[in-house]
Image: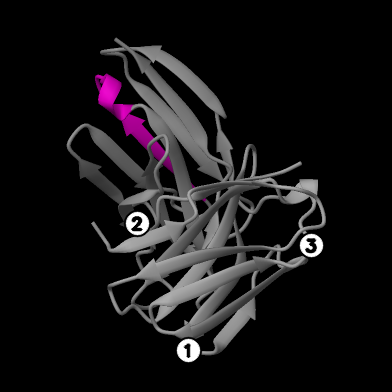
Amino acid sequence: DAGITQSPRHKVTETGTPVTLRCHQTENHRYMYWYRQDPGHGLRLIHYSYGVKDTDKGEVSDGYSVSRSKTEDFLLTLESATSSQTSVYFCAISESWGHYGGEQYFGPGTRLTVT
Amino acid sequence: TQLLEQSPQFLSIQEGENLTVYCNSSSVFSSLQWYRQEPGEGPVLLVTVVTGGEVKKLKRLTFQFGDARKDSSLHITAAQPGDTGLYLCAGVPRGQTGANNLFFGTGTRLTVIP
């Protein structure tokens, strides 16, 4: 199994509070991703990183920010959590991307509930 | 609007039955992947198909990429309880470049009853 951990695994927070989720990898992969998973939507990309301090927006980036100060860590921050951000969040890593789809390895997920 | 639509959304069958799930789009893809996700875990890649009409087999699972590269199917023969999970297709649209070029489908949740 790829060495990817996410913390916390579960979190309940109140509307308006800031929340930071952490993804840590031991594979030294260049690319890291944050997805959210909601029923009927599959996985949707929030933000991704292609190197230390190099990040870009995904499909559903509004209300989220990210940082990557080290190869192994990728943080996702909800500046002011809203109920619509209640979801399961997955971190993924990959060595490369390509037209034939680089394999992505996923962490175990973080279940976030915003009340 | 989802780029990749999967059907059915839910499927419950008896052990030993055969089943097919579908992944459809109006767009052309350079490649399609299939992932399986078990409860409480992240998705795991099963297969990648890259050529129109390509068929790949993984034990009792058969994956096919449509001739026009707009759709894919997953057929499971003699389903077992261990096949239970969420099946996700994911594709790279033709011409899409960059690390954000993989788009996931809506998923099919399969339950195999012993």
Mark 3: few, some, or many residues within 10 Å (few <14, many ≥20)?
A: some
Is A13 drawn above or below residue B101 in the view shown? Answer: above
Q: Inspect the image, locate mark 3, and give the three-letter code of the amino acid beneath it.
A: Ser
Q: Inspect the image, locate mark 2, and give the three-letter code of the amino acid beneath it.
A: Val
User: Is there a contact, CB below 8 Å, between mark 1 and mark 2?
Assistant: no
Residue found 21% across the figure and 31% down from its top: B60
Q: Which mark is residue A52?
A: 1
In the rendered image, which residue does mark 3 sit on? A80
Q: CA distance from mark 1 to mark 2?
A: 31 Å
Q: CA distance from mark 3 to mark 2?
A: 41 Å
Give the side of residue A2 with respect to residue B10, left or right: left
Chain label for disc 3: A
Residue A79, horizontal then vertical, whole percent: 75, 67
* Quarter placement of the C terminus of chain A: top right
Of labels 3 and 1, the one closer to you: 3
Determine if marks 3 and 1 fall on one subunit. yes
Residue B51, horizontal then vertical, whole percent: 36, 61
| Residue A101 shows in the view | no
Q: Inspect the image, locate mark 1, and give the three-letter code of the amino acid beneath it.
A: Val
Kindly state the secondary structure of the residue where label 3 is placed. loop
Residue A21, horizontal then vertical, whole percent: 56, 62
Residue found 82% across the figure and 57% down from its top: A16
What's the magenta region?
B71-83
Of labels 3 and 2, the one closer to you: 3
In the rendered image, which residue does mark 2 sit on? B49
Kindly state the secondary structure of the residue where label 1 is placed. loop
Q: Residue furthest left?
A: B59
Give the side of residue B94 with respect to residue A78, left or right: left
User: Is there a contact, CB below 8 Å, between mark 3 and mark 2?
Assistant: no
Q: Is residue B72 magenta?
A: yes
